[in-house]
Amino acid sequence: MAKEPNPSEDYAREIAERENQIDQLLKIIREMALKDALTGVFNHANFHERLQSEISRAQRFSSQVSLVLIDIDDFRVFNEQHGHIVGDQALVVLGQIIRTYLRRYDVPARYGGEEFAMILPDTSAEDAIKVAERIRTNVMQRDIAAGHTTTHFTVSMGIANFPVQADSGLVLVACAEAALQRAKELGKNRSEIFIP
């Protein structure tokens, strides 16, 4: 004898399915709020939140955090020569390369226009520059499709460390920015550690 349908079981199953769909949508919305839509790395707002969190953790456990700021060299000229679509491809490629070289607990972020950041917990400035150089070298070698040809781009990087060179998140960012500026002034396509 066939079992008769139970409306309350059907209703409960339907409610469970809808709750699951809502949970999935909320997960997508949370992800969208934290990530840069183009590159898939964390956005600027989340960068500052995560940096403060890592600084607090480093203070609690007497450890260190290195910050690497990355800037695509002459990006405005690159966009003028190749167009914004190719420029966007360069941003996407840089985001992919950065994620490839980071550990699961490192924080890659889009800092601004063509600038990216990497928060590296439990990492000295000397170890951070090794990561930066691997990324810089990989970027130089990566082909970007530009119409019927390919092109390349380079990046400059500035590195600073908490607590060695900075005593707060704001000072750490300022030190990394100064190191990045120094890399630009010394000819671009290079990584520099902050020198007080």
Image: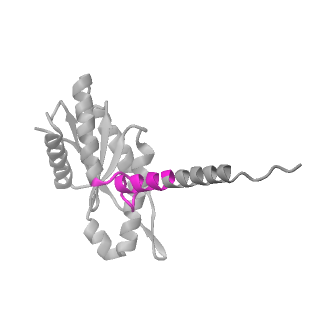
Image spot of residue 119 (x, y percent): 30, 41
The foreground one among 95 and 58 is 58
Image spot of residue 76 (x, y percent): 26, 69
Image spot of residue 169 (x, y percent): 18, 40
Q: Is residue 152 visible?
A: no
- Quarter of the image for the C terminus: give it: top left
Please name the colour scheme applied to the rendered image: one colour
Instruction: Kindly give the residue lying farthest to the top in the view shown.
Output: 62
Vertical placement of residue 61 versus 13, above or below: above
The foreground one among 33 and 185 is 33
Vertical placement of residue 126 versus 100, above or below: above
Instruction: Kindly give the residue lying farthest to the right in the view shown.
Output: 1
Question: Residue 6 vs residue 55: left or right?
Answer: right
Q: Residue at x 13, y 41 (%)?
A: 171
> Toward which corner of the image does residue 121 lie, by quadrant?
top left
Q: Residue at x 41, y 56 (%)?
A: 29
Question: Residue 182 vs residue 3: left or right?
Answer: left
Vertical placement of residue 69 versus 61, above or below: below
Image spot of residue 146 (x, y percent): 44, 72
Is residue 173 rendered magenta in the image? no
Q: How many marks?
A: 0
Vertical placement of residue 146 versus 115, above or below: below
Is residue 39 rendered magenta in the image? yes
Q: Residue at x 26, y 64 (%)?
A: 74
Q: Is residue 112 visible?
A: yes
What range is drawn magenta here?
A: 23-44
Question: Residue 113 vs residue 1: left or right?
Answer: left
Question: Residue 188 vs residue 26: left or right?
Answer: left
Q: Residue at x 28, y 65 (%)?
A: 75
